Amino acid sequence: TTMAFALPSLPWSDDALDPYISANTISFHHGKHHAAYVSKLNAAIEGTPMAEKSLEEIIKETAGDASKKGVFNNAAQIWNHTFFWNSMKPGGGGEPTGDLKAKIDASFGSYAKFKEEFSNAALTLFGSGWTWLVDNGGKLEIVQTFNADTPITGNAKPLVTLDVWEHAYYIDHQNRRPDFIAAFLDHLINWDFAAKNLG
């Protein structure tokens, strides 16, 4: 028998990111949106060879295949959201330390410059998508992906991501995306997770 995918549990409690992201937002974003991607993916792959594969395998196999767009979108959104929850922690934010800080300084000039570029990328992404800090062969880069697209279909290794789909912030910030981006960078971003991904 094949195991259906399950909704990954959050790395912290629903209200852990208050007041920057409310328990109300988390209940919708994780409990409804993220959960819906899981049930839609399970329904789409049930009884097919894909039901035997890992999430990463499904994403890589369906990327760029128009006939499998629905499967890709749901699988990639499950992966992206799980990565996003881990990209945040209570008491996060501010400057990283150690090797990660050295890499950020080397790649962007300074933390302040990184923050400016990341904020700008997140702010100027039109419509729905994600802003990522990735390690591209030793150089850190900021990448925008649209809709469900994810860096794991390419060669760069994601370190952290910010979800800039409207449902990520609308309950708490309405149309004020800049406030949400600032809250993420100043109070939520999980540099320990990024450092672990940097390896």
Image (cartoon, rainbow, N blue to C red):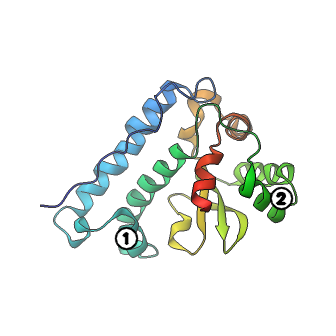
Q: In the visual, does 99 lie left or right of 30? A: right
Q: Position of residue 85 (x, y in %)?
A: 51, 43
Disc 1 element: helix
> Looking at numbered disc 1 in the image, what kind of residue is underneath it?
Glu
Q: Residue at x 72, y 56 (%)?
A: 100
Residue lying furthest left in this view? 1
Give whichever of 150, 2 is nearer the camera.
2
Q: What separation in Å lies between label 1 and label 2 (alpha carbons)?
A: 34 Å
Q: Residue at x 28, y 68 (%)?
A: 53
Give whichever of 65, 93 is nearer the camera.
93
Q: Specify which label sits upstream in the sequence, 1 or 2.
A: 1
Any part of residue 193 in sight: yes
- Circles 1 and 2, Cβ within 8 Å, touching? The answer is no
Residue at numbered disc 1 = 57
Q: Residue at x 79, y 49 (%)?
A: 115
Q: Position of residue 44 (x, y in %)?
A: 26, 60
Residue 1 vertical position relative to residue 193 in the rendered view, above or below: below
Q: Residue at x 74, y 53 (%)?
A: 98
Disc 2 element: helix
Residue lying furthest front in this view? 98
> Looking at numbered disc 2 in the image, what kind of residue is underneath it?
Asp
The C terminus: image quadrant: bottom right
Any part of residue 127 in sight: no
Asked where in the image residue 4 lies, by quadrant, the reply is bottom left
Residue at numbered disc 2 = 105
Asked where in the image residue 114 lies, by quadrant, the reply is bottom right
Q: In the visual, does 56 lie left or right of 168? A: left
Q: In the visual, does 38 lie left or right of 45? A: right
